[in-house]
Amino acid sequence: MPLDHYVTLGRSGLRVSPFALGAMNFGEDPPGAGSSVEESEKILAAYLDRGGNFIDTANFYTNGHSEKILGDFFARQPGRRDRVVLATKFFFNMHPGDPNGGGAGRGSIVAQLDESLRRMRTGHIDLYWLHNWDRNTPIEETLRTLDDLVRAGKIRYIGFSNTPAWVTAQAQTTALLRGWTPLIALQVEYSLLARTVESEIVPFAHDQGIALTPWSPLRNGFLSGKYRRNGSGADSARTAYVGRPSDAEFDVIEAVAAVAAEQHASPAAVALAWLRARPGTVVPIVGARRFEHLEDNLAALDLTLTADQLSRLDTVSAPVLGYPASLHGEMRTMLQFGGTTIDGESSAVYPPLLASDVRY
């Protein structure tokens, strides 16, 4: 599947590429933190030339340098900006000492958006993300402000990131009941090594027709093929920053490597292909500090895993879900179905009693 085989993002008319390009590493502020301007623009141009149209950043990535690189790039190419879906985020305070410099209150959202628009040299943001939950601001204030900005034409769509499922459900219900702009996507950590999102957020997204855009789909590079259980692989500087995988994580890493060998593909491509095969609309965010990283990741677009390979990866990476998700399957069939078959699911009678045994 090429990058120009687009999908609609959630319940919206917004068409995006099957992979978004993450610009978190664009820029060198502080020095050494990411990619140079030249390398960033090379990555960006390669993504766009292959038909990609969905670019994701945030106001605080490389202290605003990421947004500025994107703004300068598109300013030099008139007309190209309107052909891409440009997404950025608000929440993090970039003004030390100012309690209203970040968060999700009305004044801070408006100020953060104006700064992002200035750095990106554009009149609107296509998708504006709440980067994290603001516990000190009523969700109604955040939603009403975002709706006002949509009506003013400064943003087109909204999404949440890193926000509890109950808060997200409250927000979506409030928006729908009040006629405000609803959420169309959730940006969450999701990968073969991070599946606890399947406890609450994924079922909620499926129910509401909301798209998922996973960040860190390779789990800090653990699924890139660079790490080995014997200690070889990733460079020491990288290991010092992100740590080393646990034994359980190495079980998953090795299963991914086995599938990669069968497919004559890279482990990164296998991990991304697994995400794309999940139910619903899943648009992974692929980041790259170097051009070759992008090429390796985009190879997943041409990879289709077999049912057996998907099953093996599902099994080895199965998450331990907390209560009440841990009871949803077993308790539902045992205590609700009563030995019948409903929607294709069969169950045994539990407890193993006949109707005549019921005495009270």
Image (tube, rainbow, N blue to C red):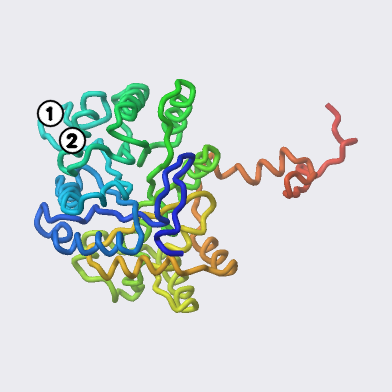
Q: CA distance from mark 1 to mark 2?
A: 8 Å
* The quarter of the displayed image where residue 111 is located: top left
The residue positioned 47% from the left and 32% from the top of the image is 169
The residue positioned 33% from the left and 58% from the top of the image is 286
Of 190 and 20, nearer the camera is 20
In this view, 30 is above or below 231: above
In this view, 173 is above or below 125: above
- Residue, disc 1: 98
Please report contact status of discs 1 and 2: CB closer than 8 Å, yes or no: yes
Where is residue 84? Give x, y as percent: 31, 50
Give the class, few, some or many, for how many residues have Cα within 10 Å of label 1's Cα (few <14, many ≥20). Answer: few
Give the class, few, some or many, for how many residues have Cα within 10 Å of label 2's Cα (few <14, many ≥20). Answer: some
Where is residue 87? Give x, y as percent: 30, 44
- Residue, disc 2: 93
| Mark earlier in primary sequence (1, 2) | 2
| View extreme (front): residue | 79
Q: Considering the numbered disc 1 on the image, is that residue within a helix, a strand or a loop?
A: loop
